[in-house]
Amino acid sequence: MTERKQVLLRLDPAVYDALARWASDELRSANAQIEFLLRRALAEGGRLPGNAKPIPRRGRPPKVPEPPGTPAEARPDDVSDSTPDDHLP
């Protein structure tokens, strides 16, 4: 992965507090919210470079839903589909 550019940013404390609350509402860090807003402003102004990589996703990967109609025997073991006696010899 390429290194990301680090930037020192000075903000009015009231502006930072509002930004941090907004970020929390959207389940982002303040840093991720700043990057999100900057990218959106650049895109709206037609100035987002075409070679800008997407914002890296953080946290647990999303669960992949099973396709509809997947037979039970094709699914991984799921304790909700079996009883403890099902696994006895």
Image (cartoon, helix red, strand yellow):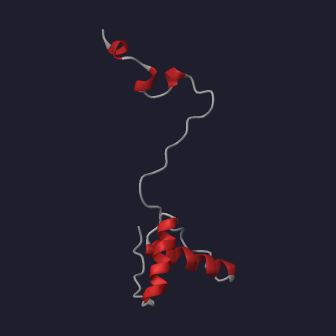
- Is residue 88 found left or right of 20 in the rendered image? left
Image check: 8 left or right of 54? left
- Is residue 78 placed above or below 47 in the rendered structure? above
User: Can residue 24 be seen in the rendering of this structure?
Assistant: yes
User: How many numbered marks have been drawn onto this rendered protein structure?
Assistant: 0
Can you give x and y, in whole percent of width and height, for residue 68 in the image?
63, 31
Q: Is residue 87 left or right of residue 80?
A: left
- At which x and y percent is residue 50? 62, 75
The vertical placement of 82 against 55, above or below, is above
Q: Is residue 48 visible?
A: no
At horizontal 50% and vertical 20% (from top left) the residue drawn is 73
**Image position of 31 (left or right of 85):** right
Residue for point 42% across, 71% down: 2
Taking the spot 56% from the left edge, 23% from the top edge, the residue there is: 71
Residue located farthest toward the left when viewing the structure as drawn: 89
- Check the picture and name the quadrant holding the C terminus: top left
* Image quarter of the N terminus: bottom left
In the image, is residue 74 above or below residue 9?
above
Residue at the farthest top position: 89
Which residue is found at the position 43% from the left and 70% from the top?
Answer: 29
Indicate the position of residue 55 as horizontal and vertical percent values. Answer: 51, 68
Q: Quadrant of residue 88?
A: top left
Q: Nearer the viewer, residue 58 or 18?
A: 18
Task: Report x, y in % for residue 62.
Answer: 49, 49
